[in-house]
Image (cartoon, rainbow, N blue to C red):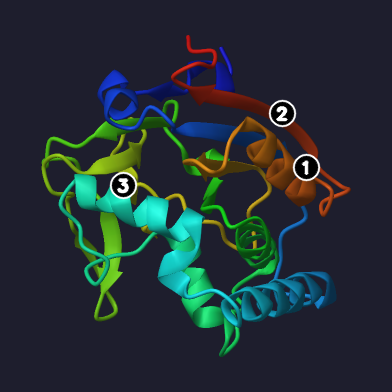
Amino acid sequence: MTTLQQAWLDPEVLARHSDYQVLLMTAENLAGGPSDDASNAALESAEAHARSLLSTTALDQIPHVARWREAYRSFGVKPRQARSSVESLLRRASDGLPRIDRLTDIYNAVSVLHLMPVGGEDLDAYVGPPRLVVATGDEPFDTVANGEPVNEPPAPGEIVWRDDLGVTCRRWNWRQCTRTRLTPSTRNALFIFDGLAPSGATQLREAAEDLAGRFDEASFASRILGLHMDRP
């Protein structure tokens, strides 16, 4: 079975968040590397989009942001403690989004343009299939603090993405682990498009098609999972 066929969502997550759907997309033979003109142009477009939106709408009044705040509160995380990845990017847009590497820059731009959390993982670093689960609290999560590698396990009840070795992203889409993050040398990736209402299957597909269209060199496959979608 392929990575997409084996991917799995914890029924408890779906019971708590019946409007949740996710599009998982694998990309093979990507041309990674440092930030370039194309990735910079994508980020500039995303920055302009965010500034225009925030000039007329308060951040906490954007439906996509508000819904993710509600989801985070459901497992005990207040907005000042941690924010969804899309809210974090929107907050940074006025001062300029970070330039990290070609792949990361582009998926961050797509996230802002479609108001949707988007994650990118190095598929070759995965061990076993991706799954979204309710954490028990003893799963390892490798990250960096004060320049040193550390293990910061999730809190019990936290919603996390994981593989066989441990948590790959804490608090749904808040922070990725070190092991599976994209780098300039990444060639095969897994992109995760998280959707809570008002984002549905149509919006997930539009965002995924936007991202795929920016990498002519790669081949893609995708699958949507959720309460009313296919599951193995």
Image coords of residue 88 (percent x, y): 44, 70
Label 3 sits on a secondary structure element that is helix
Mark 3 neighbour class, 10 Å CA radius: few under 14, some 14 to 19, many 20 or more: many
Mark sitting on residue 131: none
In the picture, measured across the screen, residue 177 lies left or right of residue 136, that is right
Image coords of residue 103 (percent x, y): 67, 60
Residue found at x 78% / y 75%: 36
Image coords of residue 31 (percent x, y): 78, 55
Give the camera-side residue of 81 and 138.
81
Label 2 sits on a secondary structure element that is strand
- Distance of mark 2 from mark 1, alpha carbons? 11 Å
Q: Which residue is mark 3?
A: 71
Q: Are marks 3 and 2 in contact (CB under 8 Å)?
A: no
Mark sitting on residue 209: 1
From the image, state whether disc 3 or disc 1 is nearer to you: 3
Q: Quadrant of the N terminus?
A: top right
Label 2 amino acid? Answer: Ala
- Distance of mark 3 from mark 1, alpha carbons? 26 Å
